[in-house]
Image (cartoon, rainbow, N blue to C red):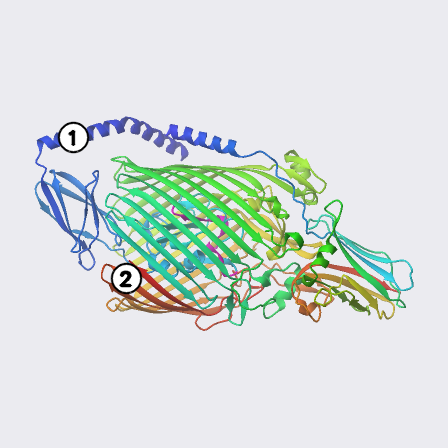
Amino acid sequence: MSIFINFRIGNFNLDMKLKLPILILSCFLFSTLEIYSQNCDYNFSGVVIDLHDQSPLSNATLLIEGTDNIAISDNNGYFKFSGLCPSNYSVTVSHLKCKSKTFSIKLDGNLQKNLKLEHHINELNEVIVLAESDKGSKTIFENKISNELINDNSSSVLGDVLKNVSGVSSINSGNSIVKPIINGLYGSRVEILNNEVNIQDQQWGIEHAPSIDINSAENIYVIKGAGALQYSGSAIGGIIIAEPSKTLLKDSLYGKTLVFGGSNGKGGSIMSKLTRTYQSGWFSTIQGTFKRFGDFNAPDYVMSNTGFIDKSASFQIGLNQYNYGFELFLSSVNNEIGILRASHLHTAGDQVRAINSDSILYVDEFTYKIAHPNQKVTHNLAKLKVYKRFQDFGKVTFQYHFQNNKRLEFDIRRGINKNTSSTDLRLKTHTLTLDFDSNLFEKFDFKYGIKGEFQNNFPNPETGVKRIIPDYDKYDFGTYFISNLKLNKNWLLEGGVRYDYSKIDALKYYRKTFWESRNYNNIYSNIVINELTNQVLTNPVRNFNNFSATIGLSKKINNFNRVLLNYSIGSRAPNPSELFSEGLHHSSARIELGDLSFSAEKSHKIGLTLSHKKNNIIIIINPYINSINDFIYINPTEIQQTVRGSFQVWEYMQTNARIWGIDTDINYDFTEKFTLKSQISYLKGIDTTNDKPLINMPPLNFKNEISYRNLKFHNFLLSIQSDFTFKQNDFPNNNFEVFVPITGKMELVDVSSTPSAYHLLNFRSSVEFKKENNIKIKVGLSINNLLNISYKNYLNRMRNYSHDLGRNIILNLSLIY
Amino acid sequence: MKKLYTYALIASLLFVSCSDDDDPVAVNEEEVITTMIVTLVPSDASTNITLKTQDLDGDGPNAPVVTVSGNLKASLTYAGSVKFLNETETPAEDITEEVEEEDTDHQVFYTVGSPLVMNVVSTNNDSDGNPLGTKFKIDGISSAGSGKLTFTLRHEPKKPNTGLTDAGGSTDLEATFDIVVE
């Protein structure tokens, strides 16, 4: 496969070098010739029409390809080009609400022609289920979260909003640290892209939430599986793509302000965004968010120290021409998150107390103050992108990203260290990418790209606490080739390959007793740099060569039915915490140990999507099976005694695993105003080597929503959602026993049992008012956990220490101008 | 394209040269308690009894070494004191001082496991007048026998409290000794 690609790339190289100057020269010559020989004052005019209801579409952008000639349709959908020469033209029409479409026009006189555009099929669906959205793959089911849903959840975190997608759940540390799970996989197995930048730092543990403000995104896409090879070959869980808004080619100034207030946590958020665009293609956007919440409530008590503060801002400036452009994007996310005070435990004995207690171990008065334990997380990113499109060749895009992560984790400490953080990580990442999107062949599209990345991690030793993630430099190089071939009107074949080289060069202090107990002193004696009394300084260097590939088919059966089939191979190198962890994890009262000898994980995933879309009904069924070799997981192995008490030891291990499941989405407009939305996500994860269930697999979830929407009356919306989560019956038994002095007995520490099933009801309503000058006001009221049900969520690490959130009444006001 | 590979290479070389080659400094964990020494001074001025637990690798794989220097006598009372040390540092750091400075945030609890019968009571208080427990006395020792005596240091317990069950907070240290009463 790779020989084939190299060969092709070699050819294009030659082609490009020879072709380009000739092409430019010939274009120049021809155009000058034409001016003298032809009558160039023809007009091409018409109306842009919505294919569905035949209404005219205003503000559509029409571009004559290969030129800078642009027209914008007016309020009646009318557009006009003038001063055209007789020729064959390609006109691309784009509209915010529609799929862009290119029309071929033969001009030999004045021409009037109406152009019909297809509305996005289900614009009113908040989670649009489109297979053809084409963000990463044409043969993998992709979900899109609409801007409306993002606006309506402006005060929420990314992980919670993503749960609106079937097959996506989350693993939480409390209510503010929410990591998405895609088809059972999370952490380093899920890549999150914010405006094309792979967000760093969220990979290392459950308690690292993605540093992203959802308000900086216009749309969010979810790709389940490793098939989107232009972004990554290691995302064996999937990829989440947050995209900023596309700017219009017209002189305009628009923006929005969203204000939220929530009863649970007695807080709220305000977010504002302003965009200025010019017909010349220049644009800039500025956006800021401020959120503040105090302690949240479970139905029966205050969850002390769960407040959070989020201060985020982003700025974007650029030139967006069809043929060339650039973009500079700056973003800063600053979070301060309280960690449930009752979860700060030290020993297995403390765990017994917490688990056996019906209530919560530590309750205080409600406060906005965030005390220890807490996290202060900063993520700054800068992106520079430049692109140029060459006629009959393709689009070349160059990007440079810089990310600076700073993470402080504060614990309850003693003495002079009381206000010193116990974790202080500084992570710097530089990324260069070069992508080529071919336009060379009509039926055969391909993309090729390379990526280089350098990352430096500095764990500050001034914390006075042993570093869990060591000092390291990491080098990555990746290259991919993806293509799709339209076999005929109905069949499309897609394929791609990617190669990643990754090197990690670390400097790590090991506790001598651990170093020797693992026999590392014999196996890795060559990496020891320095021996101290209790510790050894080592220089582990690991290299990984990872290969990933995807192949898929898309078959359009008829206008309503479509089948997608995809097979993807993904490889993921172990991350620093899996390689190097060694020590006590305070928040989970357990000792976590990594393994220096790990190899990369390899995933083989087959996904099938059957979609049926007819006027008022959409059904998507998506079964999949993911077989993972050398799957890295963490497993309890023994009990360790220390002066502080007993701890369970959890060691990272490798095994073979299989996850299979099915995601189903149904959207049925049974009248013009009533819609039923139904979602089922089911999966099963098995450790095939040891023949036991995998830990932290999401239980069966069944969501149903009935909504009433009246487009004619202020887009009035009323909806009630039922969210039923079953009990997870498949879980590994990791329980153990410890001596508890108070009872004088060995007691069972039940860390494994899963909580009972629960059923939540959520209510939403909103109404919109349109004012002149395109100003839109939307007022919304929603209530989450309407019945104030007391429940525990298996995938919340705090479930042994407290219940989940109680009722939350949210009032929101949006102003779109 | 070749040129770009070259540029990428140069860029990566630049990054390499930026990174500093200094070795990271070792972290000596300042708060780790490796050792607890309980000294029991008998009322008849005979030899002191020492209960000691020592775990020099902290959270490392080695288990603590627990020693009890002698048996208690049912006829006597004992004045006790507790000392916490961090022996990963040289000289060893006395953590008891820190605990006593932050007395309102700490308390030492004693758990007498059956069939032992004795009263263990704190004899020093924090600045709010609640028990601190780094000093204590043992009396009411009845009958011969053997059983477990546990010392628990709680950080940020509820104060005042009615005992370990009700105190909450997090456990900084928990050590159990096998005691023989003659």
Crowding at label 1, few (<14), some or many (≥20) Cα neighbours within 10 Å?
A: few
**Position of residue A806 measured from the top left corner of the image (x, y, whole percent):** 48, 69
Instruction: Kindly identify the amino acid type of the residue bearing the numbered disc 2.
Output: Lys
**Image mark 1: chain:** A
**Label of residue A564 in the image:** none
Amino acid at pointer 1: Phe
Please identify the quarter of the rendering in which residue A17 is found.
top left
- In percent of width and height, residue A721 lies at 39, 68
Q: In terms of secondary structure, where does tag 1 sit?
A: helix
Mark 2 is surrounded, within 10 Å at the Cα level, by few (under 14), some (14 to 19) or many (20 or more) other residues, namely some
Residue at 43%, 56% (x, y): give it.
A158
Residue at 69% across, 42% down: A512
Between residue A18 and residue A194, name the one nearer to us.
Answer: A194
When the figure is inspected, residue A180 is found, relative to residue B123, above or below; the finding is above
Residue under numbered circle 1: A30
Residue A190 magenta-highlighted = yes
Which residues, given as a range, are shown in magenta? A174-195
From the viewer's perspective, tell me whether residue A452 is left or right of residue A18: right
